[in-house]
Image (spheres, rainbow, N blue to C red):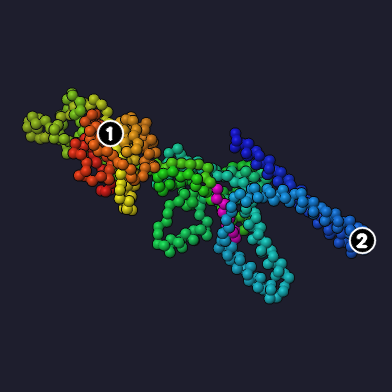
């Protein structure tokens, strides 16, 4: 409701400003005609008529300067000076400036009035370009619509809306996002000088969306594919609006805040580490839960992932092949996903391995949701209830989106003491070394060590 009132107020002020502008232009036009008429009367020798026409022209010009010019100036300070517009000279503009320099030298050396007239027109074109493009970029609002769940390094389809709040003036040739040519050149030179990789930025800053025309008071929208390079929160990011309208000599850039805040989850795409540990985890999980019931289900051939305690020696002796017993399962599989963030080494390689562990943990949580497992997530500062993975999946992913290395870490004594209370398979991602883990955890847990990723 407040947004609609603000928009109505803005449009009312815009109409009033345009009305003042047109009245001022008409009055100045009348004053100009009176001044010309006074000159004609002066040449005819009509002194009284010359004095009256000249006085009226002067009074009308003074009235405009005192009445309407301050209002337009205040309007300009509110609407234009509130948002900074950066000007960048394009390659075409550099060539154009070079031509102006040549024409100016020729005009000064020859004193030709036609060359001075051409020079004034060329310089006026640059002035007109700056003023018109500033008007084009004013009164614009951007809204970025994204899906409810966004994952790092996974492209998502977004809708970019450009709304023109101006009442009468349309906007031409506006690019939402993208990096201006001058800034790209500076960044490229800086990267070559420092020999450093480019830092990932806001996704819209990479390509940008082009709007050729947006009518006054209307809204244009386009879809584009965005990719967020890192997990975490993206808030208060600024989106660039740029335009080269009308001549392309200057690239004008206006930066406005993004209209949406978002949380980017870690990537859940399977990685090489995921494919390496998944068969091992599945084998350990099957071995842990197979035989938890009391009723015999079947006798089958031995597999490498089977535990030796379920071998049926009589059936094996009778068939001369190893056989194992399978029992009915009383409960669904329950998994405790434990993430230990107590990383003390902050070297770049260790931090890279920590990020791999975060992605792997997110991929495992996604996998348990796909197989409808009962899961509980445990960290030193966060814990969920034991529930179907589909109910708490995004709660887990949100925590992983913000998790940082450090903290007290997992208390192994408490975890080892609780390991025999219920039949829960523990999947633990930790930077702790092998020798520091209690031995009674190994039979009911599978460990993924971050320094091995």
Q: Residue shown at 65%/55% (left/top)? A: 131
Q: Is residue 335 left or right of residue 201?
A: left
- As rendered, which of 417 and 368 lies closer to the eye? 417
Q: Position of residue 448 (x, y in %)?
A: 26, 43
Mark positioned earlier in the residue sequence (1 or 2): 2
Residue lying at 59% horizontally and 37% vertically, measured from the top left: 3
Residue at mark 1: 335
The dominant secondary structure in magenta is strand
Question: In the visual, does 295 lie left or right of 388?
Answer: left
Disc 1 secondary structure class: strand
Mark 2 sits on what residue? Answer: 47
Magenta stretch contains residue 295: no
Q: Is residue 200 left or right of residue 282?
A: right
Give the residues drawn in magenta, as a range: 248-256
Please state, as top left, top right, bottom left or bottom right, where the N terminus lies in the image.
top right
* Label pair 1/2, CB-CB below 8 angstroms: no
Question: Is 352 rendered above or below residue 339?
Answer: below
Residue furthest out toward the top: 295
| Location of residue 418 in the rendering, given as x and y in whole percent from the top left corner | 24, 32
Whether residue 151 is visible here, answered yes or no, is: no
Tell me how far mark 1 sits from mark 2, CA to CA: 104 Å
List the single residue furthest toward the bottom.
109
What residue lies at 21% left-to-right and 31% top-to-bottom? 420
């Amino acid at each position: 409701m407040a947004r609609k009132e603000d928009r109505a107020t803005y449009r009312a002020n815009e109409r009033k400003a345009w009305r003042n502008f047109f009245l001022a232009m008409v009055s100045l036009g009348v004053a100009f005609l009176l001044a010309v008429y006074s000159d004609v009367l002066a040449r005819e020798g009509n002194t009284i008529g010359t004095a009256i026409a000249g006085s009226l022209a002067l009074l009308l010009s003074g009235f405009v300067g005192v009445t309407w010019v301050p209002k337009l100036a205040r309007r300009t300070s509110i609407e234009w000076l509130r948002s900074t517009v950066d000007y960048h000279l394009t390659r075409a503009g550099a060539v154009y400036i070079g031509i102006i320099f040549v024409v100016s030298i020729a005009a000064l050396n020859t004193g030709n009035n036609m060359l001075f007239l051409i020079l004034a027109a060329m310089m006026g074109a640059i002035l007109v370009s700056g003023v018109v493009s500033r008007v084009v970029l004013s009164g614009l609002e951007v809204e970025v619509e994204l899906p409810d769940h966004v994952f790092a390094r996974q492209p998502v389809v977004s809708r970019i809306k450009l709304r023109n709040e101006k009442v009468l003036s349309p906007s031409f040739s506006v690019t939402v996002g993208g990096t201006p040519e001058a800034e790209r050149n500076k960044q490229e030179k800086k990267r070559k000088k420092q020999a450093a990789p480019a830092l990932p930025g806001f996704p819209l800053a990479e390509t940008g969306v082009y709007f050729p025309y947006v009518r006054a008071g209307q809204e244009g929208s386009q879809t584009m594919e965005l990719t967020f390079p890192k997990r975490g929160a993206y808030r208060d990011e600024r989106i660039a609006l740029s335009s080269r309208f009308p001549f392309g000599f200057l690239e004008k850039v206006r930066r406005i805040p993004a209209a949406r805040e978002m949380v980017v989850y870690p990537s859940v795409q399977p990685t090489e580490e995921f494919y390496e540990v998944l068969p091992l985890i599945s084998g350990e999980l099957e071995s842990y839960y197979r035989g938890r019931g009391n009723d015999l289900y079947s006798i089958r051939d031995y597999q490498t992932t089977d535990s030796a305690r379920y071998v049926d020696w009589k059936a094996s002796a009778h068939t001369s092949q190893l056989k194992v017993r399978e029992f009915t399962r009383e409960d669904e599989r329950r998994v405790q996903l434990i993430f230990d963030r107590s990383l003390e080494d902050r070297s770049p390689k260790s931090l890279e391995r920590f990020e791999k562990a975060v992605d792997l943990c997110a991929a495992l949580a996604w996998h348990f949701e796909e197989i409808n497992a009962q899961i509980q997530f445990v960290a030193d500062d966060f814990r969920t209830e034991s529930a179907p993975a589909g109910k708490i999946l995004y709660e887990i992913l949100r925590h992983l989106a913000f998790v940082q290395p450090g903290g007290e870490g997992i208390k192994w004594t408490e975890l080892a003491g609780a390991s025999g209370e219920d039949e829960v398979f523990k999947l633990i991602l930790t930077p702790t070394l092998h020798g520091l883990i209690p031995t009674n955890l190994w039979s009911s847990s599978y460990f993924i060590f971050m320094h091995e990723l």
